[in-house]
Amino acid sequence: MNGPKVSNRRLRGAQRAAHLLGGLMLGIYVYLPLIGGPAPRVAEGLMQAVVFPLVLATGLLMWQLPRLRKRLRDRASAKEARAARAPATRS
């Protein structure tokens, strides 16, 4: 995992914000009836294609992130250990 490091606090804040925004949008969609025209179809498409997958992904990520980080950390340390044990080859 190369690239900019994001602090746990900032990551959780971003996930929480996305989750709350998605929940708010789902709540508006469910509890405020939309009247006629293309708006219901647009709102329905938005909910199905963007909001629900976003809420689902952020929820799963918040739930499984510690396990994923541990697995990635273990994989990286095992790779470093293999590299340290491998004999140096000369060209």
Image (cartoon, rainbow, N blue to C red):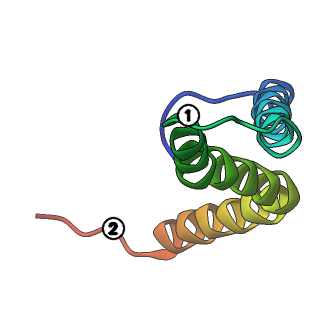
> In this view of the protein, which residue sits in the foreground, 69 or 31?
31
> In this view of the protein, which residue sits in the foreground, 44 or 80?
44
Task: Please give the name of the residue rendered at 75% of the width and 33% of the height, measured from the top-left corner.
Answer: 18
| Image quadrant in which the C terminus is located | bottom left
| SS under mark 2 | loop
**Contact (Cβ within 8 Å) of mark 2 with mark 1:** no
Of the residues shown, which amino acid type is indicated by label 1? Answer: Ala
In x, y percent, where is residue 75? 62, 69
Task: Please give the name of the residue rendered at 68% of the width and 35% of the height, measured from the top-left corner.
Answer: 35
| SS under mark 1 | helix
Q: How far, Cα to Cα, is label 2 from label 1?
A: 65 Å
- The mark closer to the camera, 2 or 1, is 1
Task: Please give the name of the residue rendered at 66% of the width and 47% of the height, measured from the top-left corner.
Answer: 54
Residue 88, label in figure: 2
In the displayed structure, 33 sits above or below 69; it is above
In the image, taking residue 35 as reference, residue 15 lies left or right, namely: right
Residue 39, label in figure: 1
Of the residues shown, which amino acid type is indicated by label 2? Answer: Ala
In x, y percent, where is residue 81? 59, 69
In the image, taking residue 48 as reference, residue 60 lies left or right, namely: right
Is the residue marked by circle 2 packed among few (<14), some (14-19), or many (20+) residues within 10 Å?
few
Residue lying furthest left: 91
Earlier sequence position, callout 2 versus callout 1: 1
> In this view of the protein, which residue sits in the foreground, 53 or 31?
31
Q: Quadrant of residue 13?
A: top right
> In this view of the protein, which residue sits in the foreground, 41 or 56?
41
